[in-house]
Image (cartoon, rainbow, N blue to C red):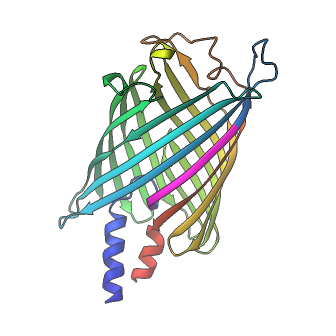
Amino acid sequence: MKKNIALLVFSLFVSIASAQPFADIVSFNYQTYSGKYEKTFDTLPQQYNKTDNYLFGFFLPKEFKNGNTLLIRINSETINSTISPDSSYSSRLSNVSLPIGMKLVNKNKKWETIFLVIPKIASDFKDKVDGYDFQYGAVFLEHFVPNNKLKIKAGLYYNREAFGNFYVPLVGVDWKVNNRIYMYGILPTSYKIEFNILKNKLYTGINLKYFTRSFRLSKVSNYDYVRYDEAQVKLFVDCFVAKKVLVFGEVGYSIGTNPWQYKYNTKEVVTNSPVYNSMKPFVVFNTGLAYRFRFDLEEKQAQ
């Protein structure tokens, strides 16, 4: 009986893998950094931007008898940015998205097709939410799975950002080199090289991340928008502190474009923005919790 239950659980969650050898059913993480501005206003010398980023995710899959799977996610993010030493200059941006779609698997299990639609609201929420705060996107991915150690991926991401249409070609290779080394992800969004240094419990490695998103500002800010282009190189540590309960941490360096404020419906930078302005490269810290199913561990338990 226990073996059958384990097989059922493994079958469910292995079927939803798209970009990594695990699925986080519930997750929360906190990212923080403090960066020095390249230039400062005369009234506020030696300015620093202190930013705290909070993310929450919930994942609900539903597998059907034919092996296809309904995919539903809820994601939320809040970014608090404050100028130091004068904390009167601050800003809060938030977004909520509801990706929903399907994973389709062919009969021989060699090909997988994933498509998602992604409605989202991204704003400073100082005014009543209207059509300008809404964004809509989609993801299409095709997987070729020649064996249980290799997966080849290609596709396209689209989102109607505050600055206009945004397209990103996606490519990736998941490769289980051996029982200790795993390479997985999708470029350019996120790719990891993972080392299992304590069997089935402690993982570490390198994470390359690039992620673009935008937020609409309110009337007091002339309906401008803020664009983030995060490009980070980070070292990570994942540790299971209990069965399927994971604590993780990351430290790395930002090498991407700073968040900029742009004038409404243009690509013209607001050069006198007190919060969203040019910063020097900075160190990034990230930590969090997750309820995680690792497919490789589920497979071993099911045997």
Quarter of the rendering containing residue 253 = top right
- Vertical comparison of 65 with 122: above or below: below
Q: Nearer the viewer, residue 280 or 111?
A: 280
Residue at 45% over, 67% down? 293
Q: Nearer the viewer, residue 172 or 21?
A: 21
Across and down, in percent, residue 182 comes to 55, 60
Residue 109 visible in the displayed image: no
Q: Is residue 274 left or right of residue 62?
A: right
Across and down, in percent, residue 63 comes to 25, 63
Quadrant containing the C terminus is: bottom left
- Vertical comparison of 238 with 279: above or below: below
Residue at 69% over, 39% down? 33
Residue at 32% over, 71% down? 11
Is residue 120 shown in magenta? no
Q: Main secondary structure of the magenta part?
A: strand
- Vertical comparison of 158 with 105: above or below: above
Residue 210 visible in the displayed image: yes
Across and down, in percent, residue 78 comes to 52, 39
Which region of the structure is painted magenta?
23-33
Q: Nearer the viewer, residue 95 or 241?
A: 95
Quarter of the rendering containing residue 252 = top right
Q: Residue furthest bottom?
A: 1
Quadrant containing the N terminus is: bottom left
Across and down, in percent, residue 97 comes to 37, 41
Residue at 66% over, 30% down? 82
Is residue 26 shown in magenta? yes
